[in-house]
Amino acid sequence: MNTKKSSKTSTPDVVLIGAGIMSATLGVLLKKLNPAITISIFERLDRVTAESSDAWNNAGTGHSAFCELNYTPQLPDGSVETKKAVKIAESFEVSKEFWAHLVETGVIESPATFIYNIPHMSFVWGNENVDYLHKRYTALTSHHLFRGMEYTEDQEEIRSWIPLVMKGRDKNEKVAATRMQLGTDVNFGTLTRAMFNYLEEQEGVELHLNHEVDDLTRKKDGSWMIEVKERDSRASRYVQTKFVFIGAGGGSLPLLEKSRIPEGKGFGGFPVSGQWLVCNKPEIIEKHQAKVYGKASVGSPPMSVPHLDTRMIDGQKALLFGPYAGFSTKFLKNGSYLDLPLSIKLNNIKPMLAAGIHNIPLTKYLIDQVRQSPEDRVEALRDYLPDAKLEDWDLLKAGQRVQVIKKDEKEGGVLEFGTEMVTAADGSLAALLGASPGASTSVSIMLELIARCFPEAKSAEWQNEFKKMIPSYGQSLAKNEELAAKTRAWTTDVLHLNTSHLEAELTA
């Protein structure tokens, strides 16, 4: 089929590639900062939030480092590192501020459509793991963002928190748990759709579904010419813009490579797929009310930390366990098996090979995961639900993640498990690579992007607007205990989270 060409060229101020949580957040921020700005959004699928932002494709934890043990590694001297956990906790508080602003200004009608109060728990067994969890609890609760966290090794107390996890468990087993009542569950799909609904109502914003970006070319004047193809008719159109954001999840790496910016050279990607076990018995679902995170298996990627998750998805309570990792050469759930091989270039093959050599245990882990039988998966579930039965659970395919591989002078190439923002030197293009804890920290990430790429961010006008949307803007919630307590009380109230737990926490 011949591609139809269009001579018409549109000229929006900003182009957003990908209709997920990142593009939605950036679009709303920019439109509130400058109502006159024009924005075009291009999404290759026929609906927004169809990939990583979809509720079934992510953990939905509202990553705040309350329960995720991979954010608090144990150091060689036995101590527990908390820097990453504090940073993530602070970033999530910033996200809640922005979401509360969206509720107060009517962008989102009701917070109950996307955020719920669900306790965050860590649960471990065995002397070594119990010792680690106690050290983690002690280290974290010395910081005000984690005040209110509870710790116990008492089986009966844990049973009162998570009865299904303790039912059928050996009474002599050494166990420990922490609980943070202020934890949340977030439906990022609903949240993202609300933001896109708002953007579509704004003058100067166009959302184009079923449109795929084919190429990006930087012109001599510093602007970008983007070729976009309508997937059904195969007709091409051209868009010229001063700024491009590549927020296409797993599809960001190939587009970054097409941009040919020097800052994007050397990056590679390692795709990891996931699956959930989803409970099909309402009577079991109703007996569990917590997000319970454990320790990852040796050699497994941090994003594969096992968790037994109470979720609220489109008003319905669900119970998920996983994720079970897998391997596919696709960079997107709805991508192509050629994604990985086509991403390998001369400038990134060395880092990718080096990262592969240094992560042989990960490769073995993924092979073992792919070979698992249904019985194997339920056996892993029984570490958390000793009485679990195969017939009570269905297997669901989750989202596709692409872990970042980047150059490293010492190792040649390293595999990164966080998010990486790549920006052109002139600020005309930015791309977001990586996975967890992306969505939960989306507001902080987009604020950093705006600071890097938009000179107006320093103006008094934009600074004032930032503070209207995010009251703590320009200050550190991690360092200012009084400010953190004040903003957390405000967001808890506006987002209709459980204030009784907050009062106990703030007076502890």
Image: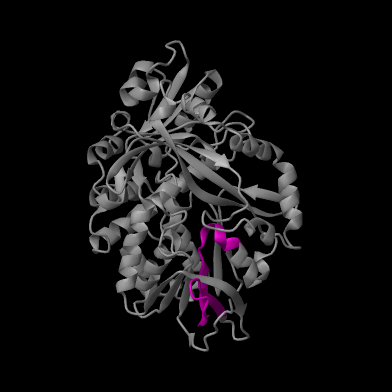
92 horizontally vs 229: left or right: left
- x and y percentages locating residue 117 in the rendered image: 29, 41
Q: Quadrant of the N terminus?
A: bottom right
Q: Relative to 247, is 328 above or below?
A: above
Q: Position of residue 325 (x, y in %)?
A: 56, 40
Name the residue located 25 percent from the left edge and 38 percent from the top edge.
503
Residue 227 highlighted magenta (yes or no):
yes
Residue beneath the point at 33% across and 55% down: 190
**Position of residue 108 in the picture relative to residue 404 (left or right):** left
**In the visual, does 205 lie left or right of 102?**
right
Q: Which residues are magenta?
A: 225-253
Residue 308 x, y percent position in the rendering: 42, 33
220 to the left or right of 440: right
Vertical arrangement, residue 391 with respect to residue 197, above or below? above
Front residue of 14/197: it is 197
Residue nearest the viewer, comparing 468 with 2: 2
220 to 347, vertically: above or below: below
Q: Who is closer to the viewer here, 501 or 280?
A: 280
Q: Is residue 183 visible?
A: yes
Residue 482 magenta-highlighted: no
Kindly identify the residue that appears in the image at 65 percent across and 39 percent down. Answer: 362
The quadrant where residue 258 appears: bottom right
Task: Check the image and name the residue furthest to the front.
Answer: 1
